[in-house]
Image (cartoon, rainbow, N blue to C red):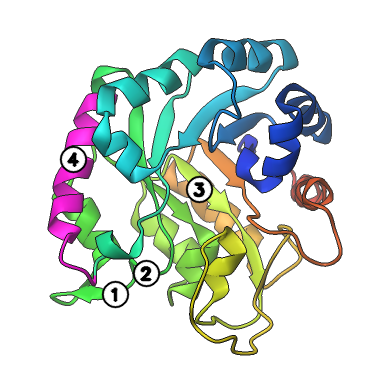
Amino acid sequence: MALPVAVQVYSVRDDAKEDLHGTLEKIKAMGYDGVEFAGLYGNDPEDIKKMCEEIGLVPISAHVPYLDMVGAPKGILKKYAAIGCEYVAVPYLSADYRPEGDCFDEVIANIKNLGKVAKELGIQLLYHNHDFEFVKIDGKYALDVLYEEVPAEYLQTELDTCWVNVGGEVPAEYIKKYTGRAPVVHLKDFYGEKSDNMYELIGIKSDKPQRPSGFELRPVGSGVQDFPAILAAAEAAGTKWVVVEQDNPSMGLTPMESIAKSREYLKTLGY
């Protein structure tokens, strides 16, 4: 049975800020089954829950800033429990908290605590990777160290297939590695070579000089990723949802056109 497909609302954040209800209606009309939030766009959790119910979208998960959750774990996570999210993900670590810094042990301890609080509220905590977790700590990727240190009960994976690839691993094989611990997989396509300031495409400003690489994020099926293999691996790994994400549009398309193109491609694969 084909996996249900959601979209990360951050992909169309400007549309969502202007009219969340209308944007969710358009997402549903494209054929998406669910949504993953990154912010509430000024709406109350109860109102968002109602919107999703009326439109027929499952609010499967949300990306919530790490420091926001650490600052007020129960207060923040309760909002997403009220929406009905089954999952909440740590979406990104700023430079001070990444594996190459001095705070990564603290990050691991905090994530373990967040996972426990989430579990009390009926939510499963996830971790959404980028490529900076693919640095070695005592011979192991930092991402693997995180998953070794925090029990699966408190932390599951949300493997981002673009950043796994950019990090130097084969996405399908890495998904298989976390069989039974990969309930949500991010489908993200790209083209071009890794560059020092590629994170500007996800809204992170860089002070590093532009180095020509042609790196861009693309609609699913329009770049270099092997999605038939990725989707087969996800199904074999016990994944429950796949989530389309495109932080920045390309190919002359608007954000809404980009996620529509991704959805149409996935339909050709039977999803």
Q: Circle 2 sits on which residue?
A: 132
Q: Could you give the CA–CA distance between mark 2 and mark 4, rounded to whole angstroms?
A: 20 Å
Q: Position of residue 116 (x, y in %)?
A: 20, 29
Q: Amino acid at mark 2?
A: Phe
Mark 3 and mark 1 residues within 8 Å of each other at the beta carbon: no
Q: Quadrant of the C terminus?
A: top right
Q: Position of residue 155 (x, y in %)?
A: 27, 40
Answer with the quarter of the image where residue 144 lies.
bottom left
Q: Position of residue 250 (x, y in %)?
A: 77, 65
Instruction: Label 3, secondary structure: give it.
Output: strand
Q: Position of residue 266 (x, y in %)?
A: 74, 49
Q: Would residue 56 be found to the left or right of residue 160 on screen?
A: right
Mark 1 and mark 2 residues within 8 Å of each other at the beta carbon: yes
Q: Could you give the CA–CA distance between mark 3 and mark 1, rounded to whole angstroms?
A: 21 Å
Residue at (24, 40) in percent of width and height: 152
Q: Circle 4 sits on which residue?
A: 112
Q: Could you give the CA–CA distance between mark 4 and mark 3, rounded to whole angstroms?
A: 21 Å
Q: Amino acid at mark 3?
A: Val
* N-terminal label among 4 and 1: 4
Q: Circle 3 sits on which residue?
A: 185
Instruction: Label 1, secondary structure: give it.
Output: loop
Circle 4 Cα neighbour tier, 10 Å, few/some/many (<14 / 14–19 / ≥20): many
Mark 4 and mark 3 residues within 8 Å of each other at the beta carbon: no
Front-lying residue, 95 or 234? 95
The region drawn magenta spans: 100-118
Q: Is residue 266 above or below residue 121?
A: below
Q: Circle 1 sits on which residue?
A: 135
Q: Nearer the viewer, mark 2 or mark 3?
A: 2
Residue at (30, 17) in percent of width and height: 121
